[in-house]
Amino acid sequence: MKRLVYLDWLRILAALAVVTIHVSAGVVTDDAQDYKSPWMSGNFYESISRWAVPMFVMISGALMLSSTRNISIPAFLKKKLGKVFIPLFAWSSIYYANEVRKGEITFSIHDFIKRISTDDIMYHLWFLYMIAGLYIITPLLKILIQHAKRTDIEYFLILWLFASVFSNWLEYFIGYSFKIELFFVTHYIGYYVLGYYLFTFEFHAKWRIVMYIGGIAGFITTFFMTYHESLKIDEPLEQFWYDEHSPNVMLIAVALFMLFKSTKIGTLKLPWIGSVISHTSFGIYLIHVLVMQTLYEKFDFVWINLHPLIGIPYKVLLVVAISTLIVFLIKKVPVLRGIIP
């Protein structure tokens, strides 16, 4: 398949957005901020970035489910799961060793096996467990997709929207929990299929405008409702509106995907550094937490405290630049490149 520039742009933005989420987290969860200007700045950057992981999943779904390559299930799983499990073991080991070094945990083989088996080593590595599950069901999902009409896929997405997106609002506002079991269409499989759907089919201009308006509304809702609901609780942050399966976040992800697919923005030539970030985006995701921790612990002279309005972008660019350089160098070493697919 010809490489699509708009998907590269989306990878770049998603990589920046993931780092933004984790840099901003320290601001919006700080009890001392008391919803003043610093907290509001952190909330702004969180609200504008929460679509990041759904976008990575949508890009994967667009490429995996649209592929016409005829490959056996064992061969597919060997290829794809190798690109997940090798990095998972490698980066789990690296982060585990770093936690042992800091005295956060005590080393033992049993403890490591338990933690890697239960996704209990570092908070962002959950993505690898999730994407592995999607890859495992992809061969079966492709059979469904290949024989499905557009209306069939829309039915699938409607079920997902109800069971995994709008049901969250139903429970949050009314306290009702949807009990009919629709596990097959819940959680990130919906974003996986949604990515394929938006990638494959064309949409009339009026529907694209609706999507863009929905994206703007999604951001505004995320920002103001997070602020409004956080004021009601005895915690610095109400995170419901940040959830990747909240309708507001989903609307932002859809709008951005369609914006880059359907407008000239998505055809803009990638600068050299943009191409590098796109090719290293998965590696940036894997390593950026370690870079953040190291800068905070060992290089506080560059991890300076500025007002979050400018401090967060500064730290994001710093972390992304360092992460990109390290990943770029790792990919140049044959014995190491396997830990960053």
Image (cartoon, rainbow, N blue to C red):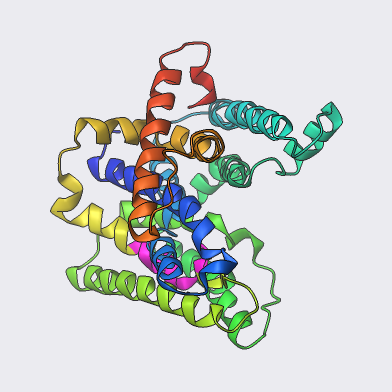
The x and y percentages for residue 215 are: 32, 69
Vertical order, 101 against 23 (above or below): above
Specify whether 118 is left or right of 159. Answer: right
Total residue callouts:
0
Q: Which residues fall within the magenta stretch?
A: 242-254
The x and y percentages for residue 192 are: 48, 52
Vertical order, 18 against 177 (above or below): above
What residue appears at the point 42 percent right and 78 percent down from the top-left corner? Answer: 224
* Closest to the observer, 223 or 340: 223
What residue appears at the point 52 percent right and 74 percent down from the top-left corner? Answer: 34
Vertical order, 203 against 327 (above or below): below
Residue furthest top in the image: 334
Q: Quadrant of the N terminus?
A: top left
Task: Write down the quadrant of residue 136 in the picture.
Answer: top right
* Closest to the observer, 270 or 48: 48
Q: Is residue 148 visible?
A: no
What residue appears at the point 33 percent right and 36 percent down from the top-left corner? Answer: 278
Task: Write down the quadrant of residue 72 in the picture.
Answer: top right
* Closest to the observer, 132 or 64: 132
* Closest to the observer, 72 or 307: 307
Task: Write down the quadrant of residue 118 in the picture.
Answer: top right
What residue appears at the point 54 percent right and 33 percent down from the top-left corner? Answer: 298
Q: Is residue 143 magenta?
A: no
The x and y percentages for residue 305 are: 43, 51
The secondary structure making up most of the magenta span is helix
The x and y percentages for residue 105 are: 78, 37
